């Protein structure tokens, strides 16, 4: 048997209302691909048996206790066997007419030095969710966390690659972790996600490590999917905000203020 084209990792904790649309539209967005669903039961109270039927081939990975986002994604990577692995959030859905998964696999097939890619992300109302991003800077943190976005508008636009049209294809610093398509050879060389980050910045870190190892990180805006982004860390007094701050401090300690693929 030829190898699977795509393993898709989905983590289920308690997002019951999101799963039907995600899995139904996802299964219909990869016509012609040999796909498998890697379904992580993150010690949920409901179990995941009801979600098995959306894919012909489903492997359930059960946790005895709740794990962090990065740790769950590593469970997916460890269990995967396909040429590509898609790591994604549960608050997503697809327009099957676009055939996003099939076209993203074709995109990767045509670019053998691309180790990690992402498609265009849209909010539920159709506005752009800015999948491709430059590495964070202190002015950007002030703009996005302290309500200074209007004053520092150019800083925010630079962060989101505003010089490119949303439908362009280009190399970028990092891609939103809600949709990351990873080449097997690349992740075997670069290694697993850094679980020290927990929930945030693990996507930024893996993109930098890909680039340092000589792999391209590419945004492909010709196809899209939808992200019901909630930005739980937006509230500065929330637990997620503190998790985000802790992850950013770890990033600064490990990577510095201005990391590049060429720095040690």
Image (spheres, helix red, strand yellow):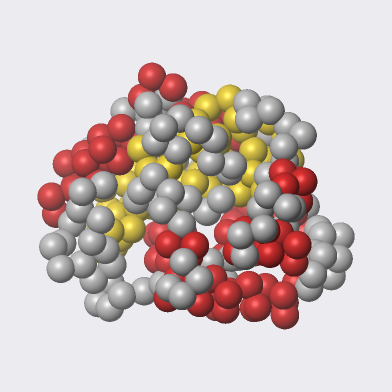
Residue 28: x, y in percent? 31, 28
Residue sticking out furthest to the front: 151
Q: Is residue 23 above or below residue 258?
A: above
Q: Is residue 80 above or below residue 84?
A: below
**Is residue 170 something one can see in this rendering?**
yes
Residue 112: x, y in percent? 68, 37
**Residue at 43% of width from left, 24% of height from top?**
99
Which quarter of the picture shows residue 208? bottom right
Q: Is residue 165 left or right of residue 154?
A: left
Residue 93: x, y in percent? 35, 38
**Residue at 72% of width from left, 44% of height from top?**
157
Q: Is residue 58 left or right of residue 183?
A: left
**Residue at 75% of width from left, 66% of height from top?**
138
* Front residue (pair 138, 61): 138
**Is residue 117 something one can see in this rendering?**
no
Q: Is residue 140 left or right of residue 96?
A: right
* Image label count: 0
Which quarter of the picture shows residue 204? bottom right
**Residue at 14% of width from left, 54% of height from top?**
49
Residue 237: x, y in percent? 46, 75
Q: Is residue 231 above or below residue 126?
A: below
* Front residue (pair 57, 246): 246
């Amino acid at each position: 048997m030829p190898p699977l084209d795509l393993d898709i990792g989905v983590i289920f904790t308690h997002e019951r209302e999101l799963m039907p649309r995600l899995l139904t539209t996802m299964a219909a967005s990869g016509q012609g691909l040999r796909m498998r669903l890697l379904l992580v039961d993150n010690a949920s109270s409901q179990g995941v048996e009801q979600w098995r039927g959306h894919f012909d081939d489903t492997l359930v990975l059960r946790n005895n206790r709740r794990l962090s986002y990065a740790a769950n994604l590593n469970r997916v990577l460890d269990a995967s066997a396909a040429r590509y692995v898609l790591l994604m959030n549960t608050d997503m859905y697809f327009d099957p007419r676009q055939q996003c998964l099939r076209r993203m696999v074709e995109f990767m097939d045509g670019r053998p030095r691309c180790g990690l890619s992402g498609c265009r992300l849209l909010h539920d109302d159709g506005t752009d969710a800015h999948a491709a991003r430059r590495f964070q800077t202190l002015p950007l943190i002030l703009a996005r966390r302290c309500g200074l976005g209007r004053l520092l508008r150019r800083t925010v636009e630079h962060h989101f690659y505003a010089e490119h049209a949303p439908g362009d294809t280009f190399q970028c610093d990092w891609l939103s972790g809600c949709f990351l398509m990873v080449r097997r050879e690349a992740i075997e060389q670069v290694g697993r996600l850094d679980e020290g980050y927990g929930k945030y910045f693990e996507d930024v870190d893996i993109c930098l490590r890909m680039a340092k190892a000589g792999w391209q990180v590419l945004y492909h805006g010709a196809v899209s999917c939808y992200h019901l982004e909630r930005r739980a860390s937006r509230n500065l007094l929330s637990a997620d905000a503190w998790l985000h701050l802790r992850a950013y401090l770890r990033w600064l300690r490990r990577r510095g203020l201005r990391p590049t693929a060429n720095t040690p």
